[in-house]
Amino acid sequence: MKRQTLASLAATSILLLLNSCERHPSAPPPEAEATVESIPKAAVIDQPASIPGDWEWQPVSLPPLEGVIAQPYSGRPVYGLYCWENEYIEFREQIRKIGWRSLRLSGPIHDEVFKMFVEDDIQVMFTMPAREPYRSPQFPQGKWRNRADFPTDEAFLEAYLGDITKVLNRYGPDGTFFKDHPELPKRPLEHIEIFNEPNFWYLDTGRNDTANHYPPKDAAARNAQNLSRQKLYAKMLVAAHAHVKKGWPGVKTVGFAAGGAMSADVPFIRGVHQADPAVAKSYDILSTHPYTRPAAPELLHVRSFGKFSIITGWNQIHDIMKQHGSAAKPIWWTELNWTINPETGGGYSNEQTDPRGRGRDIPPDLQAAYLVRAYALAMRLGVQRTFYMSLIDTDGVNSGMFNKDRSWRPSANAIARMIQLMPNPKLLEAPIDGKDGVFAYRFKSDIDDADSAEVLMIWKAQGPATVENPWSQRPVELIDTYGKTVTPEGVNGPVCVESLEIGPMPVYLRAAR
């Protein structure tokens, strides 16, 4: 039986209480007296009755709110996208419509796409992965190259630093690209991410050596492999940071980019810090990939060998940084997604999907909910930037926010509406900070606009519930996950709501002004 919509509730069971809504103290006085109506309960969007996957709710340990709120503004909002240059060229208009202004770029970099970034005011973080950063006729996506292709660590690192030099000499501060294009605004490349998921095979195993892409089953061999990668990446990070700061002191190095499924990032980050004391001073930003699919951003992903969550992983990583004197450095999530079921529109059938991810898919509406909630959770944790992968289904994974025909999936719509509603958000308050799985955060919708509205975003991670509205005395617009303003029948204008029906699909309350 479908849940009742707000309109049907209003028509059948909601008593409108005229003139009983008191204006919130922080709200400006109305230009003229107007009737504001109150309703006892509102259902803004249909909520799913069940949440797929093996997950568990436990009370969460979040950092002190005061410290998060006091963090300096990073210059761009949290909303980020991870894509390749060919995807940006193909989906440029869709990306601009959604409103992403920060991009993680991997694969080749070249003048055609960089010109687009400059024109579109996109702040780019370029990931220097296990590929050469330039196209060639034989390798249009860049030639694969990692430690396995070199006789020594030193030869590998020398080639890697040479690639950094080529990229920054062209696109960095005072790069030749801007000398060749004086008509363009000077918006150089100012963030370099040092490799991609170096705790996995990309760092030291041949592209064609698929037999060794998975960790050894033998515990001793697996531990030796992990230790080898930690030591090699420590060398890489220290050398790359020193190289960048010597030649381009204004460029920030983003370190680790660790694969975080099942918290694999935590021991790697710990081991790299332990491998060399200089590591703690050899990155400006720490990046990681905290995958927990199919579990929601706030829930524990339960496996036979352990339980993992984005929040517990963040706490462990922050503790490591604190131990090494780096706690003040920002954390970025430079890769993250949830995948949709093949039968609900995924581009890959179940037989075509990556075997490691089978059975960990969710419906498209939940993908939409989890992505916008993860943006909000990132802001609550103080994570400055979160880059979602991917624009379209890729590499046997149905993680796309668009279909291949460029039509929008629910996730693309939800992100677009969140950005429209809160283009440059600033966290102000946490009226409900995870109690019983309920999260309610108050934002200034645009930190650069003193007159911008405040917005309350509220949801419950585990499923449907009715909760007391933290803004029960505040006139608001009721807005669903996809940006639709829901107006009760018989109500004209803002409304006060005593309680809300919430669930995994977040609800927005925009304060009337």
Image (tube, grey):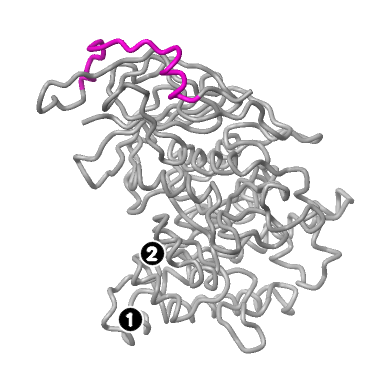
Q: Residue at x 63, y 53 (%)?
A: 399
Q: In which quarter of the image is residue 249?
A: bottom left
Which image quadrant: the N terminus? top right
CB atoms of marks 1 and 2 within 8 Å: no
Q: Helix or strand or loop: what does disc 1 sit on?
A: helix
Which stretch did the figure color magenta? 5-25
Crowd band around label 2 with a 10 angstrom C-alpha radius: few (<14), some (14–19), many (20+): some
Decide: is 362 above or below 498: below
Q: As shown in the figure, which amino acid type bears the numbered disc 2?
A: Ile
Question: Which residue position is annotated with label 2?
Answer: 122
The residue at the point 19 percent across, 41 percent down is 450
Residue 471: in sight, yes or no?
Answer: yes
Q: Establish if 136 lies above or below 52.
A: below
Residue 221 spot, x, y in % from top left? 85, 55
Mark 1–mark 2 Cα distance, whole angstroms, equals 16 Å
Q: Nearer the viewer, residue 223 or 91?
A: 91
Q: What element carries label 2?
A: loop
Q: Label for residue 347?
A: none
* Residue at x 27%, y 44% (from the top left corner): 447
- The residue at the far right in this view is 218
Q: Where is residue 320 in the image (x, y as percent from the top left)?
A: 57, 42
- In the rendered structure, does residue 37 fall within the stretch colored magenta? no
On-image quarter of the C terminus: top left
* Residue 239 seen: no
* Foreground of the two, 146 or 120: 120
Identify the residue under disc 1.
178
Relative to residue 345, is residue 467 drawn left or right?
left
Q: How many labels does the image show?
A: 2
Compared to residue 383, the image places residue 275 above or below, namely below
